Image (cartoon, rainbow, N blue to C red):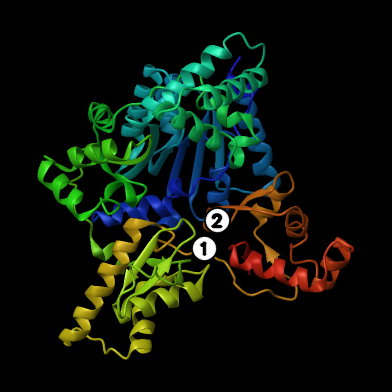
Amino acid sequence: MNPYDVTPYIDLSYVATHPNRLATMARFLGKQPAPVEACRVLEIGCAAGGNLLPMAYGLPRAEFVGIDYSARQIEEGKQRIAALGLNNVQLICADLVEIDASMEAALGTFDYFVAHGVYSWTPPQVRDALLALCKRVLRPHGVAYISYNTYPGWHTLGLVRDAMMYHSRNAASPEEQAVQGREMASFLAHHANDGIHKEIFRHYVELLNKDLKGTDNSFLLHDELSEVNDPVYFYQFVDHIGQHGLQYLIEADLRTVLPLSFTAGTQSALQEMAKDAIDLEQKMDFLRNQMFRQTLVCHTEVPVARRIQPHALMGGWLRSQAKRTTMDATAQRPGVVQFSSKDEATLATDHPLSVAAMEILAKAWPRALRYDDLLAEARQVVGIRGGSGELDGRQEEMALVSTLLRACGQSPQLVEVNSFHPQLVTTVSAQPVASRMARFEAQTRSIVTNLWHERVTLLPVQQSLLRFLDGDHSLADVAALLGNSVTDAELDEHLRWFAYAALLVA
């Protein structure tokens, strides 16, 4: 039987696959991709639509098609579509290898092509079919996203996989295989001889027991314990897509592309040693022990300039959740202000316009601000005049752009650039309304998708509360429905948190 019919994959949203991210990253290289609000998107390996349906809900003028070879998950996805009343998305059960010309003609062409969790977990003939389909249906200036496991990082994870596969080889069911796989990983972590391998095993077990992987076996069964799991080096992936008329564009995460995590000496050595952009990124993969990539590709006929373009930032929507923090005493310098994000990335700057911009963005969260509006407000705070004829103003702006780009390259939590803005609200009304998509998801699980296509984890009381925020209930109604489980002050706090988490709509 199809393993995904036996054990459906827990299908969640992946922010890096959203056309907003794909368009933004393409614009960083000077491309002009299709407008996010009215594009066509094809997702291969869509499961029950956990990634695709929130996109369709958030972009009602766009069109979405999902393909998966699990009949069980496609049927479940169709039921979700009907329940949500979505009319801009369809799911199709099909095997990639068997898609014929008539089906392809019915599908049409697409601005964005998404294949998350497919390439490394399918046989060679399916990988070839995936890339061939991408070449045929991707529009001339389209952007495709393909994720895959990579070496050298998977050389170390491969040790754990081999041990788990061996120990669970006679398991009678997928659930038993997962239990035995976890048992073997724990055994290795506790009993391996001291040294690098023991540290690898310990680190893996920590990851295995963390977040969803610790509670849902489908992650383990369809990744490390999948029958097929074929990592490749980055350069090998680039060679493979080239055979199908596709080329590397950029990564979905700017941190993978830029060497900002390395010391100045290492950055200089990399630049001297690297023969080209592909060689540079492959060498960075060796230094980072990279184990996973989210690569964007395009047609080989499209010219690609390997240089980050500031206009992508200057024409986009910016947001940041970073807070002003105190610098370590040994690193403090006069006039320098530090901002930190939840992932512990930091940005230090003594540039007044940049400091003002970062503080403005933090106050605007979860909204994003258009670059021009941010610049105007920051100038007003600092007292710097603008205008193309004023040299000082232009120099200050370029310094701001440089700071913001540096922050983007360190962490999207420091500064994130977007190509569109969702219809969210940041104030709690008398009859608050939560995203219909999030309310639907909250019926069966605590992880919901916000209006930025990010995952948000709810407390049990928040999961119950969210379902009542349909616009038909006043705050008094909601309080009554919750009974004595929350006080008025706690209810107010939860509602304000929903707004902060980008879950409320007009």
Amino acid bearing label 2: Gly
- Examine the rendered structure and indicate whether residue 305 appears above or below residue 298: below
Q: Are marks 2 and 1 in contact (CB under 8 Å)?
A: yes
Labels 2 and 1: the sequence-earlier one: 2
Residue 457 location in percent, x, y?
Answer: 64, 52
Give the position of the N terminus as an image quadrant: top right
- In this picture, is 15 found above or below 157? below
Instruction: Judge from the rendering whether residue 346 lies leftward or rightward of residue 466; answer left or right.
Output: left
Q: Which image quadrant for residue 293?
A: top left
Q: Horizontally, is 171 left or right of 244 in the view?
A: right
Label 2 to label 1, Cα distance in Å?
Answer: 7 Å
Q: Which amino acid type is shown beneath numbered disc 1? A: Pro
Q: What crowding class fits label 1: few (fewer than 14 Cα within 10 Å), some (14-19), or many (20 or more)?
A: some
Q: Secondary structure at mark 2?
A: helix
Compare residues 385 and 17 and report the one nearer the observer: 385
Does 181 appear above or below 74?
A: above
Q: Which of these two is toward me, 323 or 483?
A: 323
Q: Secondary structure at mark 1?
A: loop
**Is the C terminus in the top left, top right, bottom left or bottom right quadrant?**
bottom right
> Residue 428, how many percent across, how many down?
68, 74
Q: Which residue is mark 2?
A: 58
- Near mark 2 (Cα within 10 A), the count class, few <14, some 14-19 or many ≥20, is some
**Residue 126 can be seen in this image:** yes
- Residue 161, percent across and down? 48, 21
Front residue of 171/116: it is 171
| Viewer can see residue 305 | no
In the image, residue 141 lies at what x, y percent? 28, 47
Quarter-wise, where is residue 312 in the image?
bottom left
Quick check: 216 left or right of 300? right
Q: Which residue is mark 1?
A: 422
- The residue at the point 69 percent across, 38 percent down is 79
